[in-house]
Amino acid sequence: MQVDAGELFAQGLPEQEVINRWLREGYERLGVDAVNVTAQDLAFWDGLASQGQKAPSGSVEFVSANLKARNPAWPAPRPYVVRLVPLQQGTFRVGIVGLSQAPRAEGRFYQVEDAEKDAKAILAELEPQADVIVLVTNLRDGEISRLLPLSPKILLVVSNHPTAGELFSDSAGPATVVHAFERGRAVTVVEAAVREGRLEVDSSNLVMLDAAVPDDPELLDFVARAKADISAAQQRIAQEQRPEEMSNSPYVTSFSCASCHPQAFAVWRESKHARAFLALSTTGRLWDSRCVACHSLGFGEPGGFKNAAATPELKDVQCESCHGPGRDHAQTPGSGYGRNAAARCQTCHTEIDNPDFKFEKYWAPIRH
Ligand code: HEC
Ligand code: HEC
Ligand code: HEC
Ligand code: HEC
């Protein structure tokens, strides 16, 4: 059985509909049984509701006990699914329940209710229908530990742990809690066996999906087709946009700093930052909004980079990527602007993308 703790879908990207369609089809092909629906997955459901579509009807079941449509006519995840696992004698009934963390803002079509309250009611309803219960959730550990006493049938909790880098499995009483790895870079394999009519977890192991795990040729082909289609959609969306008027932006670009800070400008000009966008062009990802954020200036901020067609001046990592918007400073120069630049490095040189980042080592080649 394969389950996913949620936060699967893209949200907040102009091309999200295309990405999410491929993600869903990919999960069908992988044979995933159930996926938790979280507040971070609402864009997918909002898309269905706003287009009058039904809930997905494939073999993947989307589950959430506390995420609900504001109107019963709109598609919504089911609170749980019961999967039958054939054994040598008879079958075992595994109930899978989804639970989402509450969001800061709620969607137009959906709301997230109190997880603990809803879990209580749903677990009571599910208990007679299942031999064991699996929770798939993005709740935090503290919240999970309050849920465990709600049913003695909870065997396993698959948690989408929000803290990157904390990759551990731990045992909390009779239930095993396993923490999934973000961005689909690993799977946790849980082995369980039936003894004297009871299912017991024997082991759980995190397996990194690195080069040591061979790719399935059919899925590789599927991924190539998905990437090409997503890339075409990104390009179509981006090219529909017209170049924007830069005079409204709080950013003025590196060239506006050059006259007063020629030495800093000379260092920057020779650095890889000044050509960071090229790395996306050469890999064919220049329209990909998941890539551009760290290879451009001010992505996601007011007046910042949108895409290569709308804001070509804001390509590359520029002075203001580290020092912040500089229009006011360039107009009325003086001290006090742009301090704390060193604190910005790791918004892009993240632990995941650049684990060997050390400030001293990386500052040396761009010192100015
Ligand atoms: C979270 C920020 C971030 C995101 C998102 C990001 N990158 Fe990068 N990228 C970096 C950093 C930082 C480096 C430099 C790492 C180093 O020096 O080791 C880099 C380096 C690269 C390089 C190597 C450039 C060279 O000169 O060798 C390529 C290619 C690249 N990124 C492509 C991509 C693509 C494609 C995506 C989207 C799938 C992407 N990046 C998304 C931060 C990011
Ligand atoms: C990759 C990030 C980064 C980029 C890009 C960058 N800087 Fe800096 N800059 C820093 C850091 C870090 C410091 C050191 C001071 C600090 O820790 O805040 C600094 C210091 C400075 C200082 C102050 C020097 C002093 O004597 O205290 C000036 C002026 C400056 N930068 C201007 C620029 C200009 C102009 C550009 C673009 C041409 C630029 N910087 C690009 C990170 C950056
Ligand atoms: C018209 C000239 C002018 C322009 C344009 C200009 N600066 Fe400055 N900048 C100054 C002056 C003057 C200072 C103050 C120097 C001092 O106090 O030692 C300064 C100081 C700084 C400092 C150091 C602030 C501090 O308190 O330590 C940074 C960083 C900086 N500028 C970055 C930039 C960046 C980035 C740009 C482009 C967005 C830029 N400057 C554009 C004139 C300019
Ligand atoms: C807006 C995102 C962003 C910020 C902020 C940022 N970087 Fe980078 N940095 C990148 C990207 C992207 C690359 C890769 C560029 C390429 O090779 O195409 C890179 C490359 C570098 C490189 C060249 C590495 C190599 O492999 O040669 C150095 C050095 C570096 N960064 C230092 C720093 C330091 C120091 C800071 C903070 C003061 C900083 N960066 C802040 C995005 C960023």
Image (spheres, helix red, strand yellow):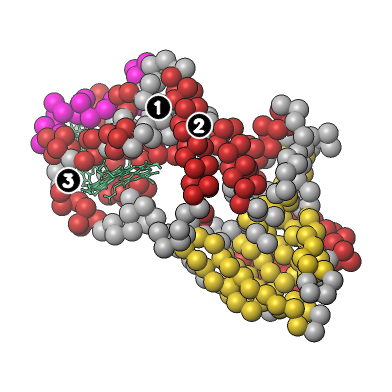
| Residue at which label 3 appears | 366
Which residue occupies 24% across, 39% down?
Answer: 273
Which residue occupies 75% across, 41% down?
Answer: 57
Q: Tell me the crowding category of disc 3: few under 14, some 14 to 19, or many 20 or more residues within 10 angstroms, Cα based.
A: some
Place of residue 188 in the rendered image (x, y in percent of width and height, measured from the top left): 56, 65
Residue 307: which disc? 1
Q: Quadrant of the N terminus?
A: bottom right
Of the image marks 1 and 3, the number of the one nearer the N terminus: 1
Q: Is residue 143 visible?
A: no
Three-letter residue code for mark 3: Ile
Q: Splitting the image into four quadrants, where does ligand 2 fall? A: top left
Of the image marks 1 and 2, the number of the one nearer the N terminus: 2
Circles 2, 3 touching at the beta carbon (< 8 Å):
no
- Would residue 27 be found to the left or right of residue 148 on screen? left
Q: Which residues are magenta?
A: 245-265
Closer to the camera, 8 or 72? Answer: 8
Closer to the camera, 347 or 131? Answer: 131
Separation (CA) of disc 1 from disc 2:
18 Å
Residue 245: which disc? none
Of the image marks 2 and 3, the number of the one nearer the N terminus: 2
Residue 229: which disc? 2
Three-letter residue code for mark 2: Asp
Closer to the camera, 317 or 146? Answer: 317
